Image (cartoon, helix red, strand yellow):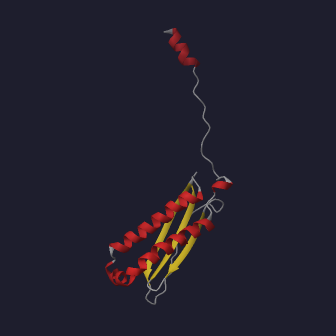
Amino acid sequence: MADNESAIATTAPELLEPTYRTKPRDDERFNAVTAKSIAAEILERELDSAKVDAGKQVEDWADFSDGFESLSKSIADKVKEKCREELHCPRYKILVHLAIGQRKDQGVSVISRCLWDTGTDNYATVSYRNETIWASCIVFGLYTE
């Protein structure tokens, strides 16, 4: 029993360093220019392909059809995934806010607010429009410690 007690008493717990970092490394920062080009490319590709049916679909917007809801979710998810792949910022939370609307002689302002650290966090914004549809996409990169 004495041997067992001495073995327990002599084993010290392993000391571990904290893994958190309060600032990202320079090669891991959110790049707003790259995020903007990614969002613009995906918006243009996805909404130009949807343009074929846009005349018919826009008439159904009064019912807030599920087609446009799923389209906006799909585009936002694609922007988020491509930003994750290409930006290489592992400790960042990527948020995508996408608004799609019908062009019918009206004005629209898309405004968002976020509490963040100006030294580490950033955003990119992209607008798209064709004859019948407008879209506004905001990509936020928020550093998580």
Is 22 placed above or below 105 here?
above
Is residue 22 visible from the viewing direction of this image?
Answer: yes
Residue 137 versus residue 62 in the image, above or below? above
The picture quadrant where one finds residue 30 is bottom right
Tell me the residue at 33%/72% (across/down).
Answer: 66
Q: Residue 7, how many percent across, how many down?
A: 54, 15
- Number of numbered discs present? 0
> At 61% from the left edge and 31% from the top edge, which residue is drawn?
15
User: Could you say which is closer to the camera, residue 52 or residue 42?
Assistant: 52
Q: In the image, residue 56 lies at what x, y percent?
A: 34, 83
**Residue at horizontal 48 percent and vertical 69 percent from the top:** 97
Question: Which residue of the protein is positioned furthest toward the left in this rendering?
Answer: 63
Residue found at the very far bottom of the displayed protein: 105
Q: Indicate whether 46 appears above or below 52.
A: above
Instruction: Say left or right for 99 vs 56.
Output: right
Work out which residue is located at the far right of the displayed protein and give it: 26
**Residue 145, x across and y down, in percent:** 58, 51
Whether residue 113 is visible, yes or no, is: no
